[in-house]
Image (spheres, grey):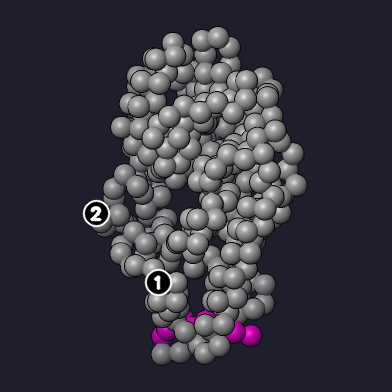
Amino acid sequence: MYELIQVSEQSYYIQSPAKIGLVRLNDTDVCLIDSGNDKDAGRKIRQLLDKNGWHLTAIYNTHSNADHIGGNRYLQAQTGCQVYAPGIDCAFTRYPILEPSFLYGGYPCKDLQHKFLLAQTSDAKELTKSCLPDGFEIIRLPGHFFDMVGYRTTDDVVYLADCLSSKETLDKYQISFLYDVSAYLDTLQMVMTLPGKMFVPAHAEATEDISALAQYNIDKVQEIADRITDLCREPLCFERILQKLFADYRLTMNFEQYVLVGSTVRSYLAWLKDTGRLHVLFENNLLLWQQN
């Protein structure tokens, strides 16, 4: 873990629970794409930098989930580097309490205020094209989170953040977190034909061909949508839908999974309603979802 792996002349990734990109800008300066999930990750990254005699100039966050921004604060304090994050995710990076609050739908109890959902605050600036190194490209990847992006480097390596999961992860956990189902499917369709020398997803193996994995992720989204629609042959409230999905997919309920999978299922329900597959009705002061 935290092994530095080179994928092209200038581009690397650090093997960690969420892959961290590292790009050499010249003989001494490097930038990171994301920073890991906590101070300990930041410390291990700093050790890699020191070992290679590299100076960290900037961290370019793909989005604001805690496992991608958790090392920001430590590295910024240690190196004086800049931190950039895209759009709404910049606000979440500056005020990370927004993430567990958003997931829970209210003030998060202490069970949800831990490093996997609540990163330390970092002094992030909004990502713009002008703050990128020469030759870098921002790739918009909405769907998994609000304004998530990926990056293409000058040597044509594409860092894809969380826009897809590995086959093994999908087969094990089934329902991967996402915010906007429609945008997510559009992103995956785009990624299927995206040119690049090498693709580095945060939660799957680096590969020269991403198309088959993108299709597998699309198929899983459609499978879950069909499952939810089928469950709603009779009117069901959200909690019953969630309960049935956990049972069908043999998932284990805890507070963290409740908010992560629950938020995702709410997004599916909204998309299915907006696309005409479900409708809502109110009975005995309960909001119920039913197949059209």
Magenta highlight range? 285-292
Count the labels in the image: 2
Q: Earlier in the sequence, mark 2 or mark 1?
A: 2
The residue labelled by disc 2 is 110
Q: Secondary structure at mark 2?
A: helix
* Image x and y of residue 106, in percent: 36, 60
What's the residue at 40%, 76% (across, down)? 247
Numbered tag placed on residue 70 in the rendering: none
29 lies above or below 238: above
Main SS of the magenta segment? strand
* Residue furthest to the left: 110
For residue 134, side relative to residue 82 (left or right) = right
What's the residue at 52%, 13% (across, down)? 29
* Image x and y of residue 182, in percent: 64, 61
What's the residue at 39%, 26% (across, down)? 45
Q: Secondary structure at mark 1?
A: loop
* Image x and y of residue 245, in percent: 45, 74
Residue 291 in the magenta stretch? The answer is: yes
The residue labelled by disc 1 is 250
Task: Answer whether residue 215 is visible to the viewer in this image.
Answer: yes
273 lies above or below 50: below
